[in-house]
Amino acid sequence: MSQKPPTVSLMIMGKEYKITCDPEEQEELIYSAQKLDQQMRKMRDSGKVAGPDRIAVMAALNLAHELQMLKSEHTRLLDRFDESLIKLSKKIENVLENP
């Protein structure tokens, strides 16, 4: 019989949410909830977005956009790293072939 993962209590915009989460993922989940809470409070306090549903959607959209930008940057950095490794490998081969 498997044991259920423990629940984590999160506060977002003054509301408590209990989320089932593996112990090794709890720290990241808590951090994510804090980041979401900050985004939502920022939206609410700006006065440009009204209503908790709209605030949640706009905050989620902003965070998803930020994540996508980071993924794109990560891909660009990996491509540059691969190119650098290929150039370095060619230089090493050249030195070894022509001592």
Image (tube, rainbow, N blue to C red):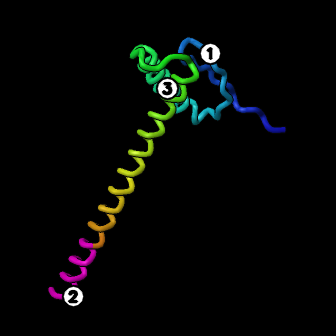
Residue 84: percent from left, percent from top:
26, 66
Q: Residue at x 21, y 87 (%)?
A: 97
Q: Earlier in the sequence, mark 3 or mark 1?
A: 1
Mark 1 Cα within 10 Å, few/some/many (few <14, many 20+)? few
Q: Amino acid at mark 2?
A: Glu
Per the rendering, the mark at residue 36 is 3
- Mark 2 or 3 closer to N-term? 3
Looking at the image, which is closer to me, 14 or 92? 14
11 is higher (above) or lower (below) than 71? above
Q: In the picture, residue 85 is in which quadrant?
A: bottom left
Q: Earlier in the sequence, mark 2 or mark 1?
A: 1
Mark 2 = which residue? 97
Circle 2 or circle 3, nearest the eye:
3
Q: Residue flagged by tag 3: what amino acid is it? A: Leu
The three-letter code of the residue at mark 1 reads Glu
Q: CA distance from mark 2 to mark 1?
A: 66 Å
Magenta stretch, residue numbers: 87-99
* Nearest to viewer (mark 2 / mark 1): 1
Which residue sits at x=42%, y=49%? Answer: 71
**Quarter placement of the C terminus:** bottom left
SS under mark 1: strand
Q: Which residue is mark 1?
A: 16
Q: Residues within 10 Å of mark 2 (few under 14, many from 20)?
A: few
Q: Secondary structure at mark 2?
A: helix
